[in-house]
Amino acid sequence: MKFRIIYPKWKKLKEQTPFFLPPHGPVVMAAALPDDVTPLFTDENVSEIDFDEDVSFVGISMMLSTQVKRGFEIAQRFRKRGVKVIFGGISAMLHAQEAMEHGDSVFLGEVEGRLEEVFSDFRQNRLKPVYNYMTKHPDIELVGPARRDLYDRSLYNHKGVQMVDLFHASRGCRFSCYPCAVSYLGGRAFRPRPIDKAIEEMAGIENNRLFIVDNSLAQNDDWEKELFREMIPLKKKWISHTIEDKPEILDLAAQAGAWYVYQAVFDTSDYIKQRIKRYHDYGIGVEGTILLGLDNQTEDDIKRLLDFLLEIELDLAEFTVLAPFPHTKAFDDLRRQNRIFDYDWNHYNAGQVVYHPKNMTSERLQELYHFAWDYFYKDESQEQKMFKLFTKLLLREMKDDTFRPRERALVTKSFGKEVVRNQ
């Protein structure tokens, strides 16, 4: 039977990068489908949906809250034709009650070893309204290689530059950060995949550039070091969230191809300053993720933080305002305090203020959000900074003989033949 998986489109903010990355959740889910199910995939951000397609069953995979309302619209179109629709993904879990009102079924939790029941019920016309597996996670060894063959990689490039493919080596997170829903979605236990299986999947990915999307790689030093050692021969170049900044780990990460990391910058402490310096000492770039609007921030704090970001020479910075997603402590606190004034999920994009901050008006926080982007990139645009970071990647790929000749021409054109020749 044919099963059409749809990833709804979502509107990017003007400050965000204009390109899209291939989504990870849908192709991980597709790897767990029964053998007699033929998956088909549409990412609405890069392709049109064929609403008249002859298809048996539709799954709508939603990662972001800003995809939820569009997902409901898509479901309505198919259900009018009598096609059954099931919702899944992170935002289906965060917005489960609403999803139940718009689909024939909702899948909650991780899929490995669980989809046979769903498709058996579908064939017997007894699809359950909810399949709730959130209380018990599957054996992590069941996670197989994602079905990256389902998407057209050529749709994910920007100005001739091949974008990264997504990959994960672990699930769960032992941390419980205030604005984050991961402890609700994936649990507080760190669940690493067997390293041999993770490396086997990574080696099989055609693209040499990866985004390792684990919540944090800095959860177990021994596991992290072993993972990086095994990655070295692959000659991949990769981005990730935080890694541990101990010298041995940073050295292994650099050898394994660490390109840059996302690092939360939450204050102007020496701890943060030295952490960024250690990354840079090992040739690893840093994109700072800066959250604005927390209760301990004043307007002066935000302005001091902006000067600090320039001082520590971040390669990139991404600014967000607190988005109180359901099932986070931020949501529970702000709702209890009657401070959330906007429940339109399209506005939960981390760039629009939907609550009353403690130390300023919501209007002023919105102004400071835009000011932060303008201030950090006042001397060098976001595109220029990104290109410099990309150039470092390309020069490393040249040394490894893994570069793309067409992209080499981009660097030669901008920086001159001598720069390239001397690498």
Image (tube, grey):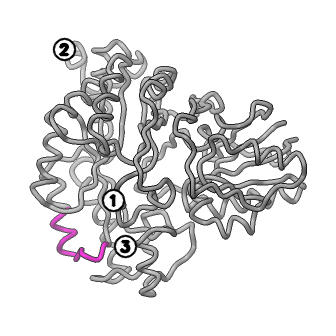
Q: Which numbered disc flags the more N-terminal residue, 1 or 3?
A: 1
- Position of residue 177 measured from the top left corner of the image (x, y, whole percent): 35, 62
Q: Secondary structure at mark 2?
A: loop
Q: Residue at x 35, y 46 (%)?
A: 216
Residue at image mark 2 = 422
Q: Nearer the viewer, mark 2 or mark 1?
A: 1
Amino acid at dot 2: Asn
Q: CA distance from mark 1 to mark 3?
A: 11 Å
Q: Residue 366 got which mark?
A: 3
Amino acid at dot 3: Gln
* Looking at the image, residue 420 lies above or below residue 70: above
**Residue 193 visible at all:** yes
Residue at image mark 1 = 319
Circle 2/circle 1 CB separation < 8 Å: no
Q: Residue at x 36, y 32 (%)?
A: 238
Quarter assignment of residue 390:
top left
* Looking at the image, residue 252 lies above or below residue 420: below
Amino acid at dot 1: Phe
Q: Secondary structure at mark 3?
A: helix
Q: CA distance from mark 2 to mark 3?
A: 46 Å
Q: Which numbered disc flags the more N-terminal residue, 2 or 3?
A: 3
Give the extent of the magenta segment: 294-305
Q: Quadrant of the C terminus?
A: top left
Label 1 neighbour load within 10 Å: few <14, some 14-19, many 20+: some
Left/right of residue 239 with respect to residue 98 in the rendered view: left
Q: Secondary structure at mark 1?
A: strand
- Position of residue 113 measured from the top left corner of the image (x, y, whole percent): 66, 40
Quarter assignment of residue 338:
bottom left
- Position of residue 3 measured from the top left corner of the image (x, y, whole percent): 78, 41
